[in-house]
Amino acid sequence: MSPRLPQATCLLALALLCCSGERLSAAGREASIVPLADGAWLLPGTFERGRQPDGNSLLLQGPKGLVVVDTGRHAEHSAAVLAWAQQRAQPLRVVINTHWHLDHLGGNAALRAATPGLRVLASAAVRDAVATRMPASEVELKGLLADPATDATTRRIVDIDLALYAVREALRPDELIAGAPQDLAPAGRRVQVGVETGVSGGDVWVLDRASGILAVGDFVTLPVPFFDTACAEQWRAALARLDALPYERILPGHGPLMSRQEFGRYRLAFGRLLECAAGPAAPADCAAGWAADLGPLLPAGSQRVVAGMLSHYIGQRLRVDAAESRRFCTG
């Protein structure tokens, strides 16, 4: 069994493994925004080698202004959101965060600074992460900076996250999403929201009624599931409940829009990956099975990093003792 890495170190290791591609400027990010339906756009996330990721952002137009589901991590991503809002000549009213990972809510700070009165909705897990998890991670990251063996690339990554931790109060939600699924109308846009567990202890999903797009945060990620703070069995159960919702298309936390059929394929691959990890197969064989099960869903050019990333997760999160495997489970 591999020794467990601290969470911050675990995430940094993945940033150095994955992925590739040209770094996009704020203007490049804005240019990458694509329409999905009437009043709905996607600002795609990025995962470039040597950088932590930005998650996808769903951008919605309501009668009373604009709504953003997830805000990314890096300045280029939040700048693209603000430029989009300026181009629409509409006020940015509401942010909904699916979970507390910085690649989905780090941009809150920049959006708040530029938008007085902006309301942020998220689960209690986000509130609690700002209060407890982020200070603990800050200590880990400062320890990396104090280590003379830490390389320059890692230092650049750490500096970005520490800058966000320094303004973490701006990441805290104003209103909590809790309990049974409920209908809301942020900025007059009709959505249904709910909370599941599996990825981060309290993960919000958002179903845009007009477009049928269901934003699920990191319940769906490519090229592999990100198990850093996950409870795998709760994650698998949550995928089944999400599939029962009246959606038309799924927006992953990382990766392109999916049809219902494609989401079904992802669910099957996810379940088979957990079964493989629970057995005696070599991690490389589990990774090969994951790639085969995903087929065309696997992003082009990512096959070479899948084995390394899944070997990491199998050793650090899936093939561990019972107490460790349930460390992030709730209930």
Image (cartoon, rainbow, N blue to C red):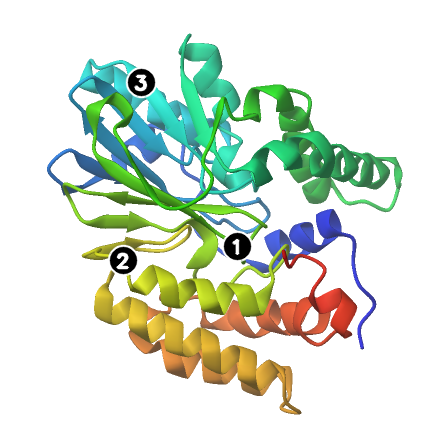
Q: What amino acid is found at the position of numbered circle 3 in the picture?
A: Leu
- Judging by the rendered image, the residue that carries numbered circle 2 is 245
- Judging by the rendered image, the residue that carries numbered circle 3 is 92
Q: Is residue 264 left or right of residue 219?
A: left
Corner quadrant of residue 172: top right
Q: Nearer the viewer, residue 210 or 149?
A: 210
Q: CA distance from mark 2 to mark 1?
A: 16 Å
Query: How many labels sit on residues?
Result: 3
**Any part of residue 44 in sight:** no
Of the numbered discs in the image, which one, if any, rests on residue 76? none
Q: What amino acid is found at the position of numbered circle 2 in the picture?
A: Leu
Q: Position of residue 15 (x, y in %)?
A: 60, 52
- Judging by the rendered image, the residue that carries numbered circle 1 is 197
**Residue at horizontal 51 percent and vertical 57 percent from the top:** 19
Q: Nearer the viewer, mark 1 or mark 3?
A: 1
Q: Quadrant of the C terminus?
A: bottom right
Q: Quadrant of the N terminus?
A: bottom right
Q: Is residue 56 left or right of residue 88?
A: right
Question: Going from the N terminus, do you reach mark 1 or mark 3 first?
Answer: 3
**Residue at horizontal 30 percent and vertical 67 percent from the top:** 263
Q: CA distance from mark 1 to mark 3?
A: 29 Å
